[in-house]
Image: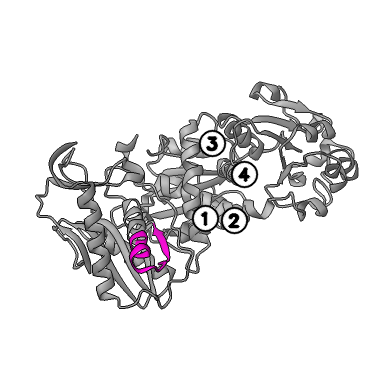
Amino acid sequence: MALSIRHLLGLENVPKEDIQLILDTTPSFLEVLNRPIKKVPTLQGTTIVNLFFESSTRTRVSFELAERRLSADVVNFAASTSSVNKGETLLDTARNIEAMKVDMVVMRHSVPGAPHFLSRMCTSSFINAGDGAHEHPTQALLDMYSIRQKTGALEGLNVCIIGDIAHSRVARSNIFGLKTMGANVAVCGPPSLLPHEVESLGVRVFTNLDEALHFSDVINVLRIQLERKAGAAFPSLREYRETFGITWRRLEGLSNPPLVLHPGPLNREVEISSDVADGPASIILDQVTNGVAVRMAILYLLGTRKESDS
Amino acid sequence: MKIIETIADELGFARTISRLAHEILERNKTLENVVLIGIRTRGEYIARRLAAYLEEVEDVTVPLGVLDVTMYRDDVRGHLKQPLPHTTEISFDIDGKTVILVDDVLYTGRTARAALDALADLGRPACVQLAILVDRGHRQLPIRADFTGKSVTTLEHEEICVLVKEIDERDAILLVETPDHQQPGKD
């Protein structure tokens, strides 16, 4: 049993067996993170470049920790300090890095499809760490792992993604992955933040939060991305909070309050209130811990994969 | 799977376990400080049998752990098939303990080496001993077993196949022909 994919570019069209394998391999790496010595020699001699054309703190740190805990050699590349500023094309940047003999590339870029393009032009194995509003597969995998850790299974679970669906790569990857694993997926948000024809992805659509909460075993609360001008889609943050903000007052009346996820960083008292984020239903910090383990599993499965496995 | 010879049937298997247990008892005057750690996959079950036998004969409960060495192997990328890591489950502190590593077959010695590295990341045992159900020779590293259930002379293209009830429905030790010469043997 090995992954059928050579790159992890997105979860759209990734077979169930591959997702299952990643989720099933994760506990072994989670166990490593709970040891006094949190490092194993597994990827010794493997060189991994973190190619970040868009700023990121937690995803980059999570990847870097995962890489170092597997003993890989890590090179960090941030667009702000590179020759991208001197006018080099994306392909030239990637080819130059590859000429330095790297094995894997973890990449974030603001343009959807950028890692897909490079993966076709280069020989390294690529992992998409976010491409525009397209996909963020490792976030969705860590969300799915965190849910499964609490509920035992994804099949048949009602999961609702709440907030700015239109600008969210996390939402897209979660929709693809969760549906492949047999969950019932819904989205909820103001119509101005729902993509056109979002139903075509096979999800239920709620514009009323209380109806969505009633439906859900699990809610994944997305960040209002003020830097992506999401704020222009509704009159005020206060109104958003009143209509779509997750507060304990809203959850406590439910017979079965849902598990609460949030990919971070939190806008406290906007999309989620502190009494929920820090409350018993929240698994937000589990997501962060699991994120390192899931990424270790992905790096291991892609980094030690043989062509003869597929 | 072509069986060349049955080295041990169910009864022979049980006798080999008891021989191993007695070797362990002879070397370690008291089992007070002793812990058993089985190497996944089949080492786990051999360790369980040893623990059960020691409990029955000596009336002591020896702590039992399971070690997965996949992440420590030196041949993760050399294998034709990608090995998948499983979980290490050791719920006790190994510092200052006499750790008896248990595996089904000792072959190249690479698994034992990986297990020593894995143990070093978990703590600092007072000493480590190696208990092996079957030693088939062909070592590639300077490693030897402290306790050996059976020594079997084998050819390179042969394999020792240890079956345990828990996963294989019966207990047995078989000498078989390696199904595919390209495949790395058990070690």
Q: Secondary structure at mark 3?
A: loop
**Subunit ID for the residue under disc 4:** A
Q: As shown in the figure, which amino acid type bears the numbered disc 2?
A: Thr
Front residue of B141 and A163: B141
Question: N-terminal of the two: label 1 or label 2?
Answer: 1
Q: As shown in the figure, which amino acid type bears the numbered disc 1?
A: Leu
Mark 3 or mark 4, which is nearer to you? 4
Front residue of B46 and A170: B46
**Subunit ID for the residue under disc 3:** A
Query: x%, y% of residue A107?
Result: 52, 46
Q: Disc 1 designates what residue?
A: A30
**Subunit ID for the residue under disc 1:** A
Q: Quadrant of the C terminus of chain B?
A: bottom left
Residues under numbered marks 1 and 2 in contact, where contact means CB atoms less than 8 Å apart: yes
Q: Disc 4 designates what residue?
A: A143
Residue range (magenta): B51-67
Query: x%, y% of residue B182?
Result: 18, 41
**Subunit ID for the residue under disc 2:** A
Question: N-terminal of the two: label 3 or label 1?
Answer: 3
| Residue A10 - label | 3
